[in-house]
Amino acid sequence: MTASNTPEAPARFRNLLGECPLVAILRGIEPSQAVSIGQALVSAGFRLIEVPLNSPQPLESIAALCGAFPQALVGAGTVLSASQVREVHAAGARLVVAPNFDAAVVREAVQLGMAVLPGVLTASEAFAALQAGATGLKLFPGEMIPPSAVKALRAVLPPGTLLLPVGGVSIANLSSYRAASADGFGIGSALFKPGMDTAEVAGLAGDFVAACAGTMRA
C-alpha cells in the first residue's frame, strides 16, 4: 500500500484533535477487551486511540478497533522501526506514535500516508522531527516538560506545530498545559491500566473529556 491510499490521515488527525484533544493510550490491553474499552472511549468523546506495541497481541487489538470504530483514528504506540510502521499499517492503523525520534520511522509513516507523532524532549529533536515530516510532536516524558517548557518551545517552533505532552498528564494539570498552548494530550495509566473494567474506564474517560472541555482555549 502506498501513501495514495491514505492521504487524509494527517489532516484527519488534526481535525479529530480539534474535536477532542485527548489520545487514549491503551498499554497492556488484551484483544478480547479492545472493542468494549474502545466503545467506552468513543461514547465519552474520544476519537484518537493508541495501542502500544508492547501490549499483548497489539496488531489484533488495532485491527479490532479499526473495524469497530471508523469514526476514530486508531494507531500504534511504541513504534520503534520502519518495519513496525509497515506492520501496523497493514493492521489498519493510520497513526504512528513513538517514544523517540527516529527519522526512518517518521519517513516510513509519511510514505504510507500516516499521521506520525515522534517523541521529543529538546528543541533540536523537535526541529529534526518536523524536518523529517512529523505530523505533530509528542512531548515525552511530560514529567520533564512542564507547562513552562511547552510555552518556551512554542515560542520558537513553526506556527501551527501540534504539541502533545504525554506522561504525567492528569485532570489536575490539564488547564496549566492548555494555558501554555498544548494542543492535546496522551493519556495512559490515568485512563487505562490492565485489570480495569469497562465501567471504570468509561467513568475516567468522561471525567477527562469534561475536564478538557472546561480548559479549552477560546
Image (cartoon, rainbow, N blue to C red):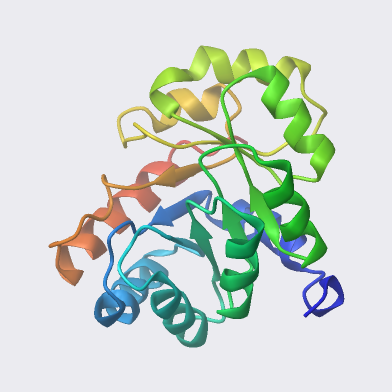
Question: In the rendering, at what x and y percent does residue 149 appear?
Answer: 55, 14
- Residue at 55 percent of width and 50 percent of height: 80
**Lateral position of residue 189 relative to residue 138, left or right:** left
- Residue at 53 percent of width and 49 percent of height: 21
Question: In the rendering, at what x and y percent does residue 41 appear?
Answer: 36, 66
Viewer-side residue, 175 vs 137: 137
Viewer-side residue, 3 vs 216: 3
Viewer-side residue, 121 vs 82: 82
Question: In the rendering, at what x and y percent does residue 26 appear?
Answer: 34, 59
Q: Kindly indicate the quadrant of the structure image that contains residue 4.
A: bottom right
- Residue at 62 percent of width and 79 percent of height: 90
Question: In the rendering, at what x and y percent does residue 87 appear?
Answer: 58, 72
Viewer-side residue, 60 vs 197: 60
Q: Quadrant of the C terminus?
A: top right
- Classify 12 as above or below 171: below
Q: Quadrant of the N terminus?
A: bottom right
**Lateral position of residue 93 relative to residue 171, left or right:** right
- Residue at 55 percent of width and 79 percent of height: 91
Q: Give the farthest residue toward the bottom.
A: 67
How many numbered marks are there? 0
Q: Kindly indicate the quadrant of the structure image that contains residue 83.
A: bottom right
